[in-house]
Amino acid sequence: MSDFVRYARQVVLREVGVNGQQLLRDSTVLVIGVGGLGSAAALYLAGAGLGRLLLSDRDRVELSNLQRQIVYREADLGRPKLEAAADNLRALNPDCAIETLPGPLDPSQLEQAARGADIVLDCSDNFPTRVAVNAACVAVRKPLVSGAAIRFEGQLALFDTARGSACYACLYPDTGEARETCEEAGVLGPTVGVIGSLQALVAIKRLLGIGEDTGRLQLWDALRLSWRSLHIPRDPNCPVCGHE
């Protein structure tokens, strides 16, 4: 009865129902990076009744994080993010099993972690990690929800080479070029919150088998509250997924 009350607002949706709620309970999601994106995504996944969350991060909670990384509290300052996030997610929903994987993960560890998940969320904040996470997902044929936000701009994409889509490397070839960080360029807190929440939404939809988000890049302009959607063509010569 308590489970029905907790999840009643989504169980009543015909696209979810009791069977869909059980699917979520039986599912595992890997979240790489528990910062601004990962905070929002993990909170919504745990709240939705996901059965198991795997979290990976390597940082400690800093004062500047609290402006946008909403899974943390001031009492968490100085704690490892994984430890603090796990405690706060369990407080939200003790039925969601939280497992932590201290980073950085090497390629074999990333592949092992991705293999144990139904879907992977890339919530990291640096290009090398994004490249490594993408390669792991392609190698073990797992869907990847990629999100990014900086300044007033956000982007979101679902990659799944097992279903014939492009991969992250098709969209962003590894040129070795440096990319801006939030520390350098700034970011408004709700911008990462919106994209992180949408990463959770895309993951839940994929787990439930509703909608089709694969192969499109969604670009959000937070200043104008406008969206653009672009098709991502697969690169047959991609060094990561071209052999698929």
Image (cartoon, rainbow, N blue to C red):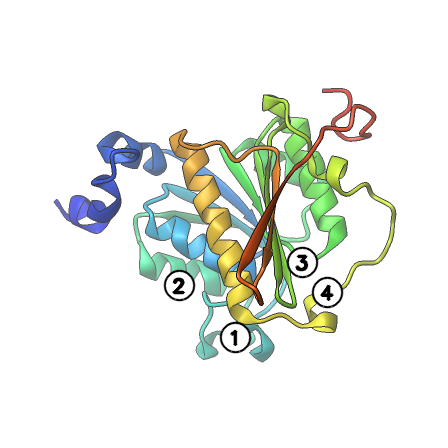
Residue drawn at x 52%, y 33% as measured from the top left: 116
x, y percent for residue 176:
87, 50
Marks 1 and 3, the one that precedes in the sequence = 1
Q: Distance between the Cα atoms at labels 1 and 3? A: 16 Å
Residue drawn at x 53%, y 77% as measured from the top left: 77
Marks 2 and 4, the one that precedes in the sequence = 2
Determine which of the numbered discs, if any, sits on residue 181 in the image.
4
Q: Distance between the Cα atoms at labels 2 and 1? A: 14 Å
Determine which of the numbered discs, if any, sits on residue 66 in the image.
1
Q: What element carries label 3?
A: loop
Q: How crowded is mark 4: few (under 14 residues within 10 Å), some or many (20 or more)?
A: some
Residue holding disc 3: 125
Residue holding disc 2: 88
Q: What element carries label 4?
A: loop
Q: Distance between the Cα atoms at labels 1 and 4? A: 17 Å
Q: Which amino acid does label 2 sit on?
A: Asn
Q: How crowded is mark 1: few (under 14 residues within 10 Å), some or many (20 or more)?
A: some
Image quarter of the N terminus: top left
Question: Is residue 219 shown left or right of residue 207?
Answer: right
Residue drawn at x 41%, y 29% as measured from the top left: 209
Residue drawn at x 52%, y 75% as measured from the top left: 66
Marks 4 and 3, the one that precedes in the sequence = 3
